[in-house]
Amino acid sequence: MRTERQSNASFLTYDRLCREVLWNRDMTLAWCQTVGLIAKEMSCPTCKEPMKLVETFDRLDNVKWECRRQVNGKKHRCEKSIRSMSWFEKSNLSLEETLKFTYWWSCDLTQGQIKQQLQLGTHTAVDWDMFCRETCEVVMMNADIKQIGGPGKRVQIDESKIGKRKYYRGHHVEGQWGFWRD
């Protein structure tokens, strides 16, 4: 499987992520817009006209959507975060930190390893780990999957019961069964 990934030109290595996406803020924003992680355009909720992307120093990303137009003789000023309605919306991490966390999570680094690399607090690492898992769960639940595997495909299924022994005694485990496929 590793050789399949390496031969796939679209596979994003960590070096490519840093070189082509995280090199600077403008490249990061452009890439996030290209792949649909943040909006390419935003309409003003007041006048319904396109908002402009402007630099600012009062936001984590140093950029925001802004509209300063006049409607019916009245001036209005509307601002929106570039994170609005996106994967990043409620995060206090920078776009770069979020992308790195997501990348490393998808590469199966442990929560502890990611926490150490990004110098995150335990609570933040746990929240993002859970958010990534829940997002995958939602995608899988909404996917119209009829068959796994197929001709020339090997399917590996594992099962585990998740839980802990009550009072640390006996062998009976309270918990839920989970099934994974590789």
Image (cartoon, helix red, strand yellow):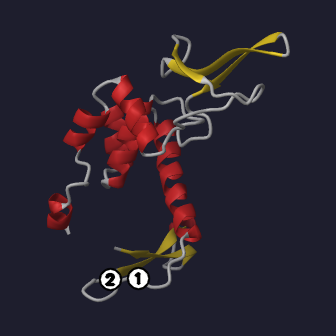
Q: Quadrant of residue 58?
A: top right
Which quadrant, please, contains the N terminus? Answer: bottom left
Asked if disc 2 and disc 1 are in contact, CB closer than 8 Å, the reply is: yes
Percent coordinates x, y for residue 131 in the rendering: 53, 49
Residue at the image position 56 percent from the left and 74 percent from the top: 176
Q: In which quarter of the image is residue 115?
A: top left
Asked if 156 appears above or below 61 in the picture, the reply is: below
**Which residue has dot 2 on it?**
155
Real-space Cα separation, disc 2 to disc 1, in angstroms: 7 Å
What residue occupies the far bottom of the structure in this picture? 151
**Closer to us: 25 or 53:** 53
Amino acid type at image mark 1: Ile
Mark earlier in primary sequence (2, 1): 1
What residue occupies the far front of the structure in this picture? 72
Which quadrant, please, contains the C terminus? Answer: bottom left
Q: Does residue 12 appear left or right of residue 65 in this picture?
A: left
Residue at the image position 53 percent from the left and 63 percent from the top: 139
Percent coordinates x, y for residue 161 in the rendering: 49, 75
Amino acid type at image mark 2: Val
Taking the image as drawn, is residue 55 in sight? Answer: yes
Q: Does residue 3 appear left or right of residue 37 in this picture?
A: left
Residue at the image position 15 percent from the left and 61 percent from the top: 7
Instruction: Please name which of the two marks, 2 or 1, marks the residue nearer to the observer.
Output: 1
Residue at the image position 61 percent from the left and 32 percent from the top: 42
Q: Is mark 2 on a helix, strand or loop?
A: loop
Q: Residues within 10 Å of mark 2 (few under 14, many from 20)?
A: few
Taking the image as drawn, is residue 96 in sight? Answer: no
Asked if 102 appears above or below 140 in the picture, the reply is: above
**Closer to us: 169 or 31:** 31
Q: Does residue 121 appear left or right of residue 143 in this picture?
A: left
**Which residue has dot 1 on it?**
148
Q: What element carries label 1?
A: loop
